Image (cartoon, helix red, strand yellow):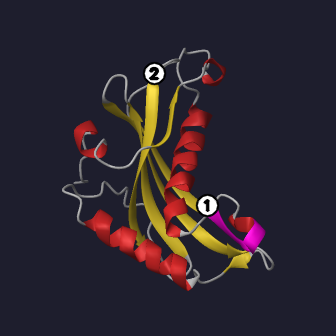
Amino acid sequence: MSTPHPTYEQLVALPAYAEQPVPVAFEDANGHLNVRHYTGIASEGLDESLVSAGIAHNWPASGHACFSAEHHLVYLAELRTGDMMSTRVRLIGRSERAAHALVYLLDDTHRQLSFVMEEIFLHIDMESRRTAPWPEDVAAALDRRIAEDAELPFAPDLSGSMGLR
């Protein structure tokens, strides 16, 4: 049996990223946020959350980048135009060259969890465009964040379909 998703009340205690209303331009013919934008907004929130770990938005300019390697997506509740949304991030673990995260997209208007994105992302050396070990300072910052997130009062709701190697 899988772990249930955390509640809105549990997740809202985490730092918020990518806070914004659902724009009209992101609406599809069904009158809700188009499927392609859930992943984009979640990814934007993950990127924002990694700045404090030393992974700046302009990190490629210094020869480093993060590339997505794998995703597992779960849609739980629709977001409609004008609904306020925010992203919350839980880091699960890291290896020498990869990291594992859960990214939650919250519907803050209706106070519910809307979407969960589980992701494996890789550290890339931009000169070779190959995976490389995390820089020591970033690795240490990720380790601190992973340890903090491990203390959250709810279990991670992992898909079981991916993991660090």
Which residue of the protein is positioned furthest toward the left in this rendering?
153
Location of residue 74 (image quadrant): top left
Residue at 40%, 63% (x, y): give it.
Answer: 91
Q: Is residue 15 magenta?
A: no
Residue at 60%, 42% (x, y): give it.
Answer: 40
Which quarter of the rendered picture does the N terminus lie within? bottom left
In the rendered picture of this protein, how many numbered marks are placed on residues?
2
Nearer to us in this view, 42 or 115: 42
The reply to whether residue 5 is in sight is: no
Is 55 drawn above or below residue 22 in the view shown?
A: below
Report the Cα–Cα distance between label 1 and label 2.
28 Å
Q: What crowding class fits label 2: few (fewer than 14 Cα within 10 Å), some (14-19), or many (20 or more)? A: some
Give the residue at mark 2.
83
Give the residue at mark 1.
68
What secondary structure is the stretch in magenta mostly built from?
strand
Q: From the viewer's perspective, tell me whether residue 39 is left or right of residue 72.
A: right
Q: Is residue 66 magenta?
A: yes
Part of the protein shown in magenta? 61-68
Nearer to us in this view, 163 or 65: 65
